[in-house]
Image (cartoon, rainbow, N blue to C red):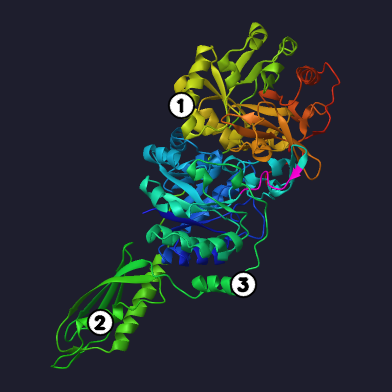
Amino acid sequence: MLELLAPAGSMEAVNAAVQSGADTIYIADGLTAAAKGDRAMDRDALAQSLRYCRVRGCRAAVSLSALCTDETLPGQVELAVFAAREGANALLLRDVGLISALRRVLPDMPLWGDVRLGVDSLEGAAAAAAMGLRRVLLSPELSLEQIAAIAKGSPIETGVIVHGPVCVAHSGQCYMSALAHEHRSDSCMRCPQPCRGRFSLGGRMDEKPLSMADQCLIDHMQALESIGLTCAVIEGRGRSPEYVAYTTRLYARAIRDKLTASEEERQYLLNAFGATGLSDSYLNGEPGPEMFAPPKEADRISSRFYADVRRSYQNSELRRVPVTFYAVMRPGEPALFAVEDERGHRAVYKGFEPLDLGRQGLSEARVREILYRTGGTPFNCKAVNCAIEPNLDYPDEAVEEARKELLHQIAEKSREPDTVTAGELPPKPEGKASDGPPKLILQVTNEGQLTEDLAATEPDLLYVPAEILAAGTENIKPFLDRGVQIAAALPWVVSEAESPVLRELLEALKARGITQALIGNLGLLPAVRQAGLALRGDLGLNAANSWTLKFFSRSGFLSVAASGELTARQIGELAKPVNTEMVIYGRLPVMITHHCIIRNSAGRCSCTSPTSMGDAFGSVYPVAKEFGCRNMVFDARKTFLADHPEVYTDAGLWGLRLLFTTESPRECVAVTERYKAKSDYLPTNASRGAYQKGALWS
């Protein structure tokens, strides 16, 4: 049966999820050492929540889904060990370095991949398995057919978000808040959701270009179960206990009783909890403008509704742990009672000697009747085995006392977690000194930027969109003539349906003599390796700590870009076991969206030429076509560090990258010459990006 995985951001939400029928909960957000907000659970609350779940036969995963810096990763490992020793059944993760470290520290603990890993294909699931994950949550943008193909062939368990808020950014990987708000990055689970604001497209202020309806797949539970999916996930890590209880109860019923929601229940899902709308368009493979709706506050719903929801989990105990009772009564011996659950816990209770009446006394049927009464407890009596000799009498009250004591004992035994094998965090990886001055790396986004003048600046490495290289362009000849290495910048997002196109693209690159590929998603790694191309890592890999860089070193990468959410100091302090790049100029990517947001607003596709999107504060975000008719949104400001070269020249970097997006061919040359100290070019609307203030907790 499909496993129902429900969120719990507070102790009351834990209660709500368990009593509403969740098979597993994930205790989320506030537990990360980085996140500091009103949803945080302290360790006592975490331990208490895990005990609560164990007694009731509900599994509990602990979500440590923030990106880690070198400063925060040891604390996250310590927290993971604490959670494991307190009885957590799994850890939900997205940081590659943390995953790598925990494989050694907690070798027996199941590690699950968070949706923010961006797994869109069977190759992505294979890459997750190779990392040591036992389960991965797939990107919410996939259709039922794509999910089925992945679930069928995946070497590990798979799950999808079936209800709750989904981000307009692919798999929730968004950097908009990171570049605009200090320590408010989605990467540390503290996103202020700037995408829910007003934006102008096509010269007018549009109410809903980025604000998406909630995912709602309650009509598709049987279809998801039939394709071999492991778990259905309710998203809403910071939402109220009432939301957790109501959605969990509806989805538990849909899975177990095959009953979908009534129209009235759908209206409560929509109106009571602030949903912008409800949509199943991703699963149907028909995403479009109807998935977008302006954000709103929860409608005014009668207080009685919320009171009824609270009552459903506060004043009840779901009997979900099967137990078997035993009763033995013989003349002249104390009565013996025992209980055993399916997890192997046992308890024994010795009563007093039954009275021998010499005539018909207590019947086995009566004993069974009393022992079956487990209401108000987490236990469900599935059988009572009796061996009661005739003519014996034993008070009903004494049998009831035995039942209560046995259930108390087995509950106490259930609270105790199993012994966990835990090692020590491996030391911070050792780096390696870069040979000579940093390499100059240029990245272009269109063919027109590839000019003779740009080649004359003599970069060491050039990143060019793979589609341009595969089509064959003479514009790279001046670079090749100067001995510049060329690498194909692959799309960050390739869904399962697009995997054949990716393989054709890689074959075309090989035929053109391209030997290196720049990737921003681990799901591309198997295909690129199979094609025989050397690997370089882009910003999308979120390399924010030294352990992550070590992972990519072991995986054979030639170089990896440090996360654009780190400060320059943090980048400088990274051990560099693999050649490490820093993007020191350009508009950093903000998000990739599965939608053509320009077409959604204007009603027609104009993505062949870059356009822009403005917010209510006057910032203008360039929008460009991305692989598969998606959009890439770039930062409103250009990161510019040439006037403070000490920021990057003293950071021990192998490579310095200039990222060209909206720049004209002439601007590309002027910027490059400025970084080579051959001009005094100064761009308009420049910033330090996150390199000065930082975006991740430290």
Q: Quadrant of residue 433?
A: top right
- Which stretch appears magenta? 205-212
| SS category of the residue bearing label 2 | helix
| Residue type, label 3 | Ser
* Mark closest to the chain's N terminus, 3 or 2: 3
Residue 136 in percent (x, y) is at 47, 43
Reply above or below: 687 against 248: above
**Distance CA(mark 2)–CA(mark 1):** 65 Å
Residue 598 in percent (x, y) is at 67, 36
* Res 367 label: 2
Instruction: Name the residue that disc number 3 marks.
Output: 302
| Residue type, label 1 | Pro
* Viewer-proximal residue among 595 and 381: 595
Q: Quadrant of residue 586?
A: top right
Question: Decide: marks 1, 3 in contact (CB < 8 A)?
Answer: no
Instruction: Name the residue that disc number 1 marks.
Output: 500
| x 82%, y 18%: residue | 677
* Res 141 label: none
Q: Quadrant of residue 126?
A: top left
Q: Residues within 10 Å of mark 3 (few under 14, many from 20)?
A: few
Location of the N terminus (image quadrant): bottom left
Residue 328 in percent (x, y) is at 21, 78
As for residue 650 lying within the magenta part, the answer is no
